[in-house]
Image (cartoon, helix red, strand yellow):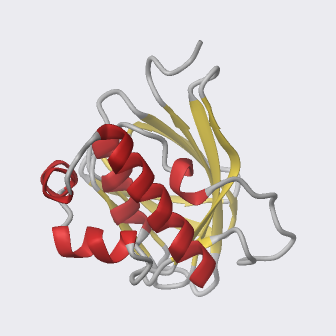
């Protein structure tokens, strides 16, 4: 994971400099402490998926900007996956495509995992499809249980969360649409 941590930090620093934002401004816009952002930039801390979402939303950039593109491994998690302490592992299946305005991820939730997501940029929509196992999705103020084959579309510019109460891992695809990004 050292390489992932360093690459994420480099991407964060590059984007912040391109935007000409200070760490103070990014901390204010993203709702993440300046100290944490500095640790991420220096490769000293592995951010959670939730933290990366906050930063990506502040910059109005896709999450895959920080995770890079990789091919789908046969078994989870392999190099190319971003796994955090919440029990969530994320890998881009299709990195952000500016012509189409979307990106798609394969996400694994370990038993007991809970990942809460702050609202994304205005107008962002997610399509979640469970591929294997069972998970709960928090949208519109309530938890919904989804099993393999179930799918939901929701406004991701509202608080939402993913949880695995089952005894085995769950895998789902997450297609994220960015309004106005398509050509």
Observer-nearest residue: 48 or 118?
A: 48
Residue lying at the far right in this picture: please name it. Answer: 74
Observer-nearest residue: 166 or 105?
A: 105
| Quarter occupied by the N terminus | bottom right
Q: Residue at x 40, y 72 (%)?
A: 48
Count of numbered labels shown in the rendering: 0
Q: Is residue 39 above or below residue 24?
A: below
Observer-nearest residue: 114 or 15?
A: 15
Q: Is residue 97 in view?
A: yes
| Quarter occupied by the C terminus | top right
Observer-nearest residue: 156 or 29?
A: 29
Q: Residue at x 58, y 59 (%)?
A: 67
Residue 84 appears at what percent x and percent y?
A: 48, 78
Residue 130 appears at what percent x and percent y?
A: 64, 56
Q: Is residue 93 above or below residue 76?
A: above
Residue 101 appears at what percent x and percent y?
A: 56, 26
Q: Is residue 1 in view?
A: no
Q: Residue at x 38, y 54 (%)?
A: 53
Residue 154 appears at what percent x and percent y?
A: 42, 37
Is residue 96 found left or right of 13 in the rendered image? right
Is residue 169 found left or right of 153 in the rendered image? right
Q: Residue at x 59, y 68 (%)?
A: 134
């Amino acid at each position: 994971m050292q390489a992932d941590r360093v690459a994420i930090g480099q991407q964060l620093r590059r984007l912040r400099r391109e935007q000409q934002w200070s760490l103070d401004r990014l901390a204010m816009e993203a709702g993440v402490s300046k100290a944490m952002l500095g640790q991420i930039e220096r490769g000293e801390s592995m951010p959670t998926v939730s933290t990366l979402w906050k930063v990506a939303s502040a910059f109005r950039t896709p999450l895959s900007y920080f995770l890079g593109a990789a091919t789908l491994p046969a078994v989870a998690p392999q190099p190319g996956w971003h796994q955090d302490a919440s029990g969530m592992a994320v890998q881009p299946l299709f990195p952000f495509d500016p012509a189409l305005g979307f990106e798609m991820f394969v996400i694994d939730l370990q038993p007991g995992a809970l990942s809460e997501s702050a609202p994304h940029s205005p107008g962002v929509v997610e399509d979640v499809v469970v591929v294997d196992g069972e998970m709960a999705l928090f949208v519109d103020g309530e938890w919904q249980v989804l099993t393999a084959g179930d799918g939901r579309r929701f406004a991701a510019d509202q608080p939402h969360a993913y949880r695995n109460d089952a005894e085995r891992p769950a895998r789902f695809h997450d297609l994220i649409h960015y309004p106005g990004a398509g050509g």
